[in-house]
Image: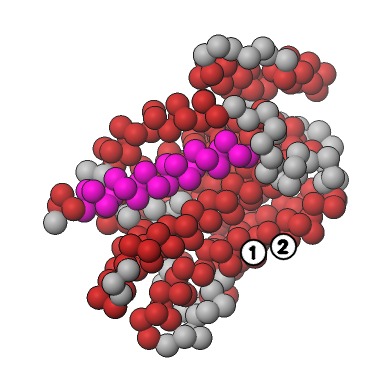
Amino acid sequence: MSRQRKRRNLELVATIPASPFPMTAVLIRLREYGSLLDKWLLLFCMVWAGLLIALNYTLDIESGFIRGLDSRFNRCAVLFLVYCCAFAVPYGFATVVRKQLIAPAPMFWVLLLVAPALFAVKATIASPLENRIEGVWGDYWTIVSALPFKLLVVLVPLIVLRRWFPEQPGFWGLTLRNVRWWPYGLMLLMMVPLIAYAGTQPDFLAAYPRLKQIAFIAPHTEHFGWFQLMYEVSYGIDFVTIELFFRGFLIFAFARYAGPAAILPMAVFYCSIHFGKPLLECVSSFFGGLILGAVAYQTRSIAGGLAVHLGIAWMMEISAYAGNLRSA
């Protein structure tokens, strides 16, 4: 597809009138944006993500090898290589084979390495409270403080990088402009039966709810519910980090060079951070990343996608909690 035709199609999508049926409008827009994507690049990314998933779950790379490494530095280095494979290889295919880069520049190649490095640091860095407070409560506060600290680790570089991308919407898409909430509510409703089904599966119940990480403090407090709530708020903060990074930074920075093709490598990268999760969750994360990426690219906002992601995460917590009660 020529560059001029892509630009005309993008302008056409931007002018699609609002529909009285919000989900219909979203599906129309997603279909139109899908027409902008290079089908061979899409096929390559699907095959590449499938190959990485197969290698990970066959060889137990993330859950076995990486988690078994003896230092955070080593885990960070190996995760950087994994994320580079997931992210840079699709861009290599887009650049060399499909000629998808619109405006290649030195900054693009820098960002191509910075992005996996930043998320590898985020994934492995320790809470500043680790080993600072002794006993049970030291363990609790270490867990609860870890994810807000990881948000800060990602946020500071994004603040610095923002000066090179002044044309971005809001702060890496963190804006309520062009957001209509009904479609996102319908997306969440569509996920309810799938999440309810997941709550009956042993591998899902083995990983969730994440809340069980703090079960050890129950005998030490009369206000366990408040400490559970604090944990869930901390857990939700991680999805702010993820949406800012994946649907914000990886789309609005890289779309400057690759246009809508930026959605596809982002989805493979996003899939790779789920390698330690249940297989079905990992596979679905690739397609979820595509949808949320297309919506962010279309609306120039990550707010709706963040709401969906948070809703799904907390519904998974509830489903798993109920599933564990049933199996107890």
Question: In the image, what residue occupies the spot 51% across and 68% down?
Answer: 146
Is residue 316 within the magenta segment?
A: yes
**Neighbourhood count class around disc 2 (C-alpha, 10 Å): few under 14, some 14–19, many 20 upward:** few
In which quadrant is the C terminus drawn? bottom left
Residue position marked by numbered label 1 in the rendering:
152
Q: Looking at the picture, does residue 145 appear above or below residue 275?
A: below
Label 1 with label 2: CB-CB less than 8 Å: yes
* Residue 59, image quadrant: bottom left
Q: Which residues are magenta?
A: 302-324
* Residue 121, image quadrant: bottom right
Question: In the image, what residue occupies the spot 59% across and 27% down?
Answer: 180
In the image, taking residue 198 as reference, residue 282 lies left or right, namely right
Front position in the image: 17 or 248: 17
* Residue 199, image quadrant: top left
**Neighbourhood count class around disc 1 (C-alpha, 10 Å): few under 14, some 14–19, many 20 upward:** few
Q: Is residue 264 visible?
A: no
Q: Amino acid at mark 1?
A: Leu
Q: CA distance from mark 1 to mark 2?
A: 6 Å
Residue position marked by numbered label 2 in the rendering:
156
